Amino acid sequence: MTTASPRAGTHAVCPGSFDPPTLGHLDVIGRAAGLFDRVTVAVLVNPDKRGMFALEERLELLRATTADLPTVEVDTFRGLLVDYCRDRGIGAIVKGLRAVSDFDYELQMAQMNHGLTGVDTLFMPTSPAYSFVSSSLVKQVATYGGDVDHLLPEVVARALAAKLAQR
Ligand code: PNS
């Protein structure tokens, strides 16, 4: 009989812009938390791209919406995702795939990232209920008065309404 060798706890990252987090993001994060011992949701710090939500607001929204997941933490990263993973001993990148159209670019990035440091990317099909949901579409629809509340965690829907009311 063979005995399994002890291994370090598994740690995955769910990277993204999260401007703002949607129920599609939360679906993937929650399911990743069920598969890995530890999950870090890492928000890209992109000085060249100003989003609707400031970095600190996105972090707050992510912390609020993942508060019920004790093994999930929220962080930021800048530069290459592979460097972030290597520095923290993160062995897997988890990416949600909404449709086949996501696959081309995601595959390219996954292969590039694997070639750089050997880190693996796992693709998680999003739940069909969220397959059409993206942060950019949600913002666009909400900007012109469409109802997107059912696609967002409650705290995010409130934050988005407040943001649009300021305009
Ligand atoms: O939510 P997004 O904007 O689709 O997330 C894209 C993100 C942040 C995951 C991706 O752009 C990324 O990993 N950026 C970090 C820079 C990097 O590592 N680029 C090389 C990718 S092969």
Image (tube, grey):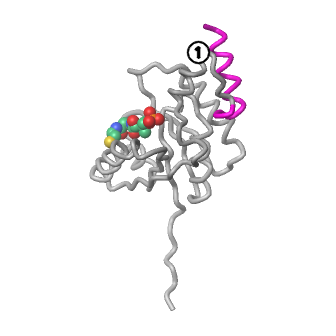
Q: Along the line of sight, which residue is nearer the eye, 151 or 13?
A: 151
- Whether the magenta-drawn stretch holds residue 159 is answered as yes
In the rendered structure, the answer to whether residue 117 lies left or right of residue 165 reads left
Residue at the spot x=42%, y=48% of the render?
85
Q: Position of residue 67 (x, y in %)?
A: 70, 42
Picture layout, residue 164 above or below residue 57 = above
Q: Position of residue 157 (x, y in %)?
A: 68, 26
Residue 130 occupies which quadrant of the picture?
Answer: top right
Q: Magenta residues?
A: 150-167
Give the residue type at disc 1: Tyr
Residue highlighted by disc 1: 144
Q: Where 165 sits versus 115, above or below?
A: above
Helix, strand or loop for the magenta stretch, by majority: helix
Q: Position of residue 83 (x, y in %)?
A: 37, 44
Q: Residue furthest top?
A: 167
Which image quarter has ligand 1?
top left
Which secondary structure, mark 1?
Answer: loop
Q: Is residue 28 above or below residue 54?
A: below
The residue at the point 51 percent across, 39 percent down is 42
In the image, taking residue 114 as reference, residue 35 lies left or right, namely right
Q: Where does the image place residue 97, in percent across and percent down from the top left? A: 47, 47
